[in-house]
Image: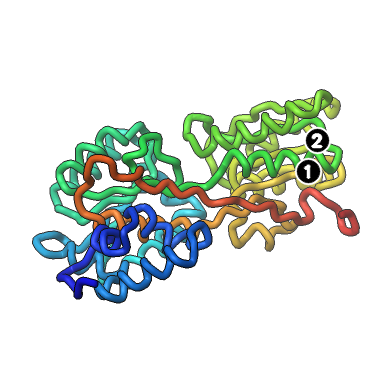
Amino acid sequence: MAGPVDSPTIRDVAALAEVSAATVSNYFHHPERMSAATRERIRSAMETLNFSPNGAASSLRRGRNPVVGYISYELASARTPAITNAMSERLAAAGMQLLSAVDGGDPAREREFLDLFERQRVTGVVITPVTDIEPTLARLRARGMASVICAQRARSPEQTSVSIDHVTGGRLAAEHLLATGRRRLAFVTDTLELSQIADRFAGVTAAVREHPDATVEVVWSSARSVDAGEASARQLLQRPRRDLPDALLGVNDLVAMGLCGGLRGSLSIPGEIAVIGYDDIEFARLAAVPLTSIHTPQERLGEMAATLLLEEVAGGERRPGDAPRPQVELAPELVVRGSTVSAGEP
């Protein structure tokens, strides 16, 4: 076997182990998918080359700014701090720093931040896009800036991404409500334009279609906040009782908690109406009526985004015939609490 090389990359490990770079990536994320013999060859190659994923940063800092840019669209989101903190810790372990920007869902600001990060010659960028940003990321990649799309699945096999299976998340929420006997569902959101939210609603509608006696409507809120949820609840209460939904699916936990607050004193939860949230933030279980929610692994999302970016940079330039870039999708889980099921119910 060859001896250690300066600043070994994933490609070097792959060549020595006689596997693809994608297989080396799977060694870190999905070792159960490969044989023991393949794992041993990769492990041995890493040991011979003295390779570590954390070593990616040191090979990149030469002539570059050891900073990664992160563009999110929502500072007020309860999810953003968890993602940002996990990403920052993972990058810090590799000797790098995270610079965060918030575009507020404005496509112009999204482009401005990408331009700024390119001028600053950051090592790479992690972005939760509000537009079809992949052509721009491809151009930046050609100029040497690595990128990872976070919280959305990339469309192109050339774009690395990490996301959550929101279609399954929406389906889990609706199936739970339907299993408790609810038949008039309402999805409360401020938009269906964002792919993550559109995917959740697609999962809800798919579950509802399997029950001929069930329906789902969209109830619009002004924002994804507690106040907006309360306002939506007050609007719903203006309807005749016979026209009210018997279950509400908040686009996130903040909206769902606002719905609970706005309904309090008018309708019993979950007796007359069930409420379910999304994301399973810390406050969900501490609400006056503990909130049933779809747990999404935000910390894991941020950690994986940082890890994929480091691997992207360490992998070097792409060659014809290389395997598609990784597109990791994390699974959500249903967490049942008192806002959908009364004490003593299964």
The amino acid on which the numbered mark 1 sits, given as a three-letter code, is Ala
Query: Which residue in the structure is indicated by mark 1?
Result: 274
Label 2 SS? loop
Q: Identify residue type, mark 2.
A: Asp
Question: Would you say the residues marked 1 and 2 are in contact, meaning their CB atoms lie under 8 Å apart?
Answer: yes
Residue 261 in picture, x, y percent from top left = 70, 48
Query: According to the image, what is the colour scheme of the structure?
Result: rainbow
Q: Position of residue 202 (x, y in %)?
A: 61, 31
Distance between the alpha carbons at the discs numbered 1 and 2: 6 Å
User: Of callouts 1 and 2, which one flags the residue occurring earlier in the amino acid sequence?
Assistant: 2
Residue occupying the point 24% across, 72% down: 1
Q: Is residue 107 above or below residue 5?
A: above
Quickly name the residue at label 2: 246
Residue 71 at x, y percent in the picture: 33, 48
Determine the image quadrant of residue 92.
Answer: bottom left
Within 10 Å of disc 2 (Cα), the crowding (few <14, some 14-19, many 20+) is many
Choose between 214 and 10: the one closer to the eye: 10
